[in-house]
């Protein structure tokens, strides 16, 4: 496996390890519902992030609670969750050359990275 592949794998493992746990955490998560839900892309999403050679375009955006955001991943730029689970959602995975839309149902800061080049994008949900 290449160094890039090992780093990508390590980032995914870190994203999956949220720490904590226990029945109280599981119960709170169940009653609160998901923070991010995959949805069909509308004609006009609240924001659109597109990968490029060295950054997301735009690199950051702010949307309102419940709005839909579109992510476009170009060749060699798969999008994945930022490795700190307190700052993102593990649902944010967009393979190379795919487009996905997500509804953000909780306020907060959601960070994501290009899994090959490690540049960062940030979405703020009010």
Image (cartoon, rainbow, N blue to C red):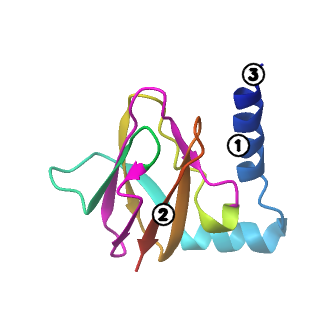
User: Is 83 covered by the magenta stretch?
Assistant: yes
Label 1: how many Cα within 10 Å (few below 14, some 14–19, many 20+): some
Q: Is residue 109 above or below residue 43?
A: below
Say which residue label 1 marks. 12
Q: Which mark is residue 2?
A: 3
Q: Earlier in the sequence, mark 1 or mark 3?
A: 3
Using the numbered discs, state the Cα–Cα distance from disc 2 to disc 1 in whole angstroms: 18 Å
For the record, the magenta segment spans 56-84
Q: Is residue 94 above or below residue 35?
A: above
Residue 34 can be seen in this image: no
**What x and y, as percent, mark residue 54?**
47, 43
**What x and y, as percent, mark residue 101?**
35, 48
Look at 78% across and 40% down and name the residue there: 10
Say which residue label 2 marks. 122
Label 3: how many Cα within 10 Å (few below 14, some 14–19, many 20+): few
Quick check: 121 left or right of 100? Answer: right
**What x and y, as percent, mark residue 21?**
82, 65
């Amino acid at each position: 496996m290449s160094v890039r592949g090992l780093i990508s794998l390590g980032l995914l493992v870190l994203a999956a390890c949220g720490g904590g746990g226990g029945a109280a955490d599981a119960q709170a998560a169940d009653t609160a519902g998901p923070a991010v839900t995959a949805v069909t892309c509308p004609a006009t999403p609240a924001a659109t992030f597109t990968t490029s050679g060295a950054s997301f375009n735009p690199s950051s955006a702010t949307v309102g609670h419940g709005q839909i955001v579109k992510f476009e991943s170009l060749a060699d730029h798969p999008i994945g969750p930022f490795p700190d689970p307190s700052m993102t959602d593990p649902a944010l995975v967009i393979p190379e050359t795919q487009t996905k839309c997500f509804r953000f149902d909780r306020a907060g800061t959601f960070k994501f990275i290009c899994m090959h080049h490690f540049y960062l994008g940030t979405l703020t949900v009010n």
